[in-house]
Structure formats: structure tokens, C-alpha cells
Image: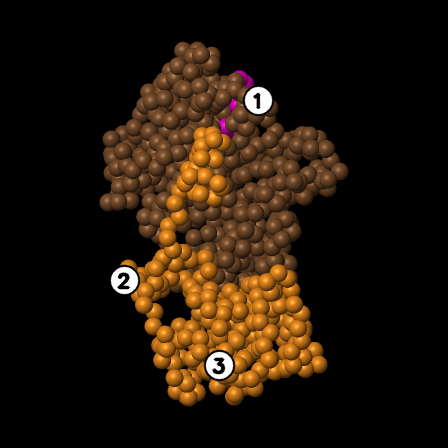
Chain colours: A orange, B brown
Amino acid sequence: MKVLVPIKRVVDANVKVRVKPDNSGVDLNNVKMAVNPFCEIAIEEAVRLKEAGTASEVIAVAIGASVCAEQLRTCLALGADRAILIETDEDAQPLAIAKALAAIQEKESADLVIFGKQSIDADNSQTGQMFAALTGMAQATFASELTVADGKATVVREIDGGLQTIEVTLPAVVTTDLRLNEPRYASLPNIMKAKKKPMDTHSPADLGVDMAPTQEILSVEPPAERQAGITVESVDELVDKLRNEAKVIS
Amino acid sequence: MLAELHEILSPQRVLTDDASLAHYGRDWTRSYEVAPSAIVFPESAEEVASLVKWARATATALVPSGGRTGLSGGAVASNGEVVVSFERMNRILDFDAADGVVSVQAGVITQALQDFAQEKGLYYPVDFASSGSSHIGGNIATNAGGIKVIRYGLTRDWVAGLTVVTGAGEILKLNHALVKNATGYDLRHLFVGSEGTLGFVVEAQIQLTPAPAEQQVMVLGIERFTDIVAVLDHFKKTLPLSAFEFFSELALSYVTSHRDLPRPLQQPTAFYALLEFDEDRLDDASAAFEGCVEAGWVVDGVLSNSRAQSASLWQLREGISESIAPKTPYKNDVSVRIGDMESFIDETNALVTSAYPDFDVCWYGHIGDGNLHINILKPDSLASDVFHERCHEISPQIFAAVQKRDGSISAEHGVGLLKRDFLGFSRSDAERAAMAAIKTVFDPDGIMNPGKLLSE
């Protein structure tokens, strides 16, 4: 069984992001970048399937500038067998990404495609679903448990108010939720070996995909600063403030 | 007494209830009786000076109290002393952008200083597990070290100026944040590491430094202690390190189970080294790793992929002390030269296990600084007082092993009450006589943290 894992290079989850002074976007200059945490979970799940003997090959794929190769190398160090970089300097948006990935799937015919449920930068949660629609594959989103056997994937999904278990026939798309697994550390011997693993580069044009953005970002604003709390002297004062200032009691 | 204190401080800044006396009267040590007579909360240097003058007039002993994270009993009040808490002196006073110097009151929490530096695009590099609670004043009084010493030195190296209230009740402003000041004795450095025995630090001018590059963390698995030293040497020759820590498999097993953390490597090894370095030197670090593997020193290793993973790897080192706390360990903190570490560890292990075969020694520390933390864990079957009594019987032998190597019986935790009677293992009679003479100059009545560091 072949497993394809699309991954995204994003700002490290623990970086305090800063908006550019001209409000055109987030300042990425000299900012620590990492594999999107949900994509890291996707890679881990794929590698575990391989270690269990269920999967035979794990392919990591990324779309973006040439620096995305760093994150693909990380995935190779974590256990992916090979990597594909679709290199573009365009601002890649979900639909174009899904189309490019569908073109890769056309070549690779993976039995399972594991996406992160969303990327922590734009938080769209669209690419996996769009990819499933474009390829006509079954989809099981927000997985917190995945079992693959007999040409089927059984997926426990995190839904509002509980868990839902569904079964999908392969080939299928799964998107990972936070509790699916805990990603491992990249071992240094594997990082060394990863340098020798193959990484192919394609251009969107090779794949017949137009990456031009269809949406334009007009302005990015930081969230309003939270005001400092105050200490009240008495219960009466607290009640007064709750009633007359916060207006949360009557 | 209360009436007199109320003349200096408003009544709500003088506490005498039992809970407060117990809380403010001790540090992180738990083995001393705690019996202060009052806790006072001054808000300025002048108020501290008034308190000292009152203490002189009434022959009252004073004990300084910061974040109470000390491990040597330096801030313990067990003889009816008045505890001077710096909790309300927690303001950042001024920032000089041209010099990168920040003026703070003594009660500013270390982490607040780190955060302030970060806001200014700068860095305060002294860092350790208790930085979220400890005060800068306490850091200065103990010359705190921690995990970045290999690159950035000790607290002393960042104190550009100091305001102290001496035991004579005088306010001294020392060095005024000057870089160059060739005017004789640098009294500032006498107060750094003085453990409150000469006077109390009330304000400090702290030098900040440019923010470091993004850091990367590696954890390496190493089977023999001698190889840890070889690995340190090999890495140091290849790239600058921000940290080089080590811990034993025993320490790792406690911290991973206590904090429910994944083990870093697939197979356990006898020792682990944690390294931190600038991310842009990753290629050099990887080459150094390969060199260490080829030399047969390193078995396996991992690299953090993200800040979250770096933090998890750091927890493996920083969580040790907390995770072994339920074993009420006997703690010791010593330093020897790096080349003497292995023989010192061997001798200590032999000392402990020959006397008490069921005692486990849990080792960790700052290898890059020659600093070892010795923790002897209490077997579950043994009562705590019996255990500590037995450990204290071993202490002089451990200190003799330190002395034989011209080491220090306290690398960074200070002397306080815990090691006062053992100071002779690291300081000669003449040195201790000089220290006592210096104390009488600044503290003529012997009221400043008496009984700590030097015998009364």
C-alpha cells in the first residue's frame, strides 16, 4: 500500500507572529519555520503504518518555494521514503494546491492520502476535502484513530459533541486531528540517511496547474490587545462592576 | 516590636500570622525548623535602610527573602529573625537603550526580566529551572548560574551596577553601570554571591545582550562517562554551544514517568547529553555528531523539529529535580575541573554504595561547567530522618573527594546553612578569616543573615 502525505511549511507554532507594518501579511523574515503540526501527525501515522507492515511506501509532498525542501527533509528523516517538491513562488491557495496534489495522485495512485486537518497559519481546513472531491476519493476528516485492513480504512472522527466511527473504501483521504498520535523526534542517524533519499521537483506547469491566486488579501490585522485586569476591593464593588460596566448581570 | 515596625512600614506590610511565618521563613529546603518573628515587606531602598537601622538598634537579626527557591537554606529564618521579603520591590525602574542596561528592584522575578529583555529585542541569558519564581536579588546574592553558563557566564557577569543596603544601614550605589571603572576595589563583586551576609541587594542595573539566533536542541545517547567529556570537547571545537547538559538513565526514567514524556531514543543508554546551539550552525553540529558516532562515543541521537520539541527535550533535563522530589533526595551540588569529573563520580558512587548498597545516586548537571548535581534517592523502605542522617554521614567524605581535586563544595547553590560547616573543604583558614573580617566591615553588629555562609 502506497501512502501519500502532503505537508506544509508554516511558522513554528510557538513563535509569536507579528503583522508586517503595512498590514500586507505576517512578517516571515528570520522567523522559525517548521512542518505544520497536523502534517507532522500525518507523517507519523504514515510511518507507523509502514512500520506495522501495512504500508509499503510513504511519500511526502510539499508545495511552495525551494526552502520547503527543509521540511521535506525532516519528513524523510522521520521515515518517509521519498519526497516530491512542487516548486512555486506564487502564494499557493487551497484549491490550486488541491489541484496540484490531484495531479501528483494521478501519477502515484496512492491508496491512502493523509493530510493534516488544517494548517496552523491560515486555518482553512479545505485542502484535504477539495482534494477528495477532485479525485473522487472517499474522505474521513478529523481522524483520532485510523485502522487499515482489507482495502478499507476505519476511522474514528472527532466531531462536535463526541466521536464518530466510519469506514471508507480505499483509495481514501484521511485528515488528522490532534489526538491521532504523538510525533517522534527525528533521530540524527535518520537525518543523515535522509540526505540520500530521493527528492523530485516538479513545477506547477509540468503538472498542468495554474497556481495564480484567486483571492487577494486586502489587510492583515493583529487581534485587539487584551486589557489588563483590575483588583476590586470588595464584593460590592465587584457586583457593581459586573452590573454596570461589564453588564453581565442585571 | 510590632509597634516599632509599624513606624517604618504600614501595618499591612508587617505579617506575623503563623501561615505567613511558615511560608516566608523558608526556602526550597525542607529540613530546617522555621521560626521567624515577623515578615516585613519594604517597597524602597530607604525603607530597607530604616529597617536595618532599627535592627541594629534592637540587635534583631534580619533574613532576606526573594523567590525562596534556594537549595542551601540561605533564606531560612529559624531563630526568631525578621524576614525582609522583597516581593513588593518588583518594579522595573528604567531602561537605557543606548547601553542595553535595565534598572530593576531586587524583587523582580527572573523570568519577568527575561521577558522584558525580549520585549526590547534583547536577551537576559541567566536561566534555570526556577526562573519563574526566583528573584533577581536572590540570583545576585547567590551568583546564580544555570543552563546557559557555558556561553554566557554567571549572574555576576551581567550585574553592571548594584544598590545595596549594608548591615550598617548605609545605602551604597556600586559601579553605576560603568563598563570601565579602574578606581580600586570593586565592591559590587563582594556583594554578588555574599548570600545577604554583608548587606541586602535592593536594586540592580543589569546588562542585557543581543537576542541569540534561533536555537536547536540535540539529545545524544552515550554509554560511558568518559565519552561525554570527549563529545563535549569535540563539539566545542566545532561550534559554539549554548548549553551542554548531562543526565543519567536513572534521572531520565524518573522524569519521563513523572511528566509522561516520550523517551528521546529508542534504546536506553547509560547517559544522555543535551546540547543547544544556533540553528544556523546545524550543519556543523551534524558533522560533529557524525564524528562522535565514528569515534564510537555516541550511540544515537535526536534533533528537535520545532520549538515545541525543543521545549519537550529541555523538560527531560529541567524536570529531573521535580520528578525525584517524592524520593526526598539528599542533594549536593559540587564542581571540579572537567577532566576530574569522571574519577570524582566513580569515587562518589563507590563511597555511597559501599556504605549503603540500596541507595541510588542520580547524576545530572552542567558538564560544560564542571558542575555536577548529586542526588541520593531515599529507598522507600527507609524513614526520611534516618536516610538524611546516613547521607550526612557520607557528606564529609564526598567533600573530601572534592577537596582532593581542588573543587568547590558548592558550585552554584551557595553555602547557606547547608554547607557552612564544610566551607573549610573549599576555602582555607586564611581565606575564611578574611571573609569574616570583610563581614565585620559591612555588618558590624552581625545582624545580616547571621549564621549563613560563615559561623556566627
Residue B429 covered by magenta stretch:
no
List x then y, in percent, for residue A36: 48, 67
Numbered disc 3: secondary structure: helix
**From mark 3 to mark 2, how far is it between C-alphas?**
33 Å
Question: Looking at the picture, does residue A126 appear above or below residue B38?
Answer: below
Residue at 47% in and 14% down: B2
Residue pointed to by mark 2: A22
Residue at image coords 39%, 34%: B90
Percent x, y of residue A80:
55, 75
Please state which of the two labelled residues, at mark 2 or mark 1, is closer to the viewer: 2
Q: Which residue is mark 3?
A: A101
Which chain does tag 2 point to?
A: A
Picture residue at 63% right of the left edge, 38% below the top: B329
Q: Main secondary structure of the magenta part?
A: loop
Amino acid bearing label 2:
Asp
2 and 1 marks on the same chain: no
Q: Marks 3 and 2: same chain?
A: yes
Report in which chain the residue with disc 3 lies: A
Residue receiving disc 1? B18
Q: Which residues are magenta?
A: B73-80
Residue plotted at (36% across, 22% down): B47
Mark 2 Cα-neighbour bin, 10 Å: few <14, some 14–19, many ≥20? few
Instruction: Give the foreground label among 3 and 2.
Output: 2
**Residue sticking out furthest to the front:** A250
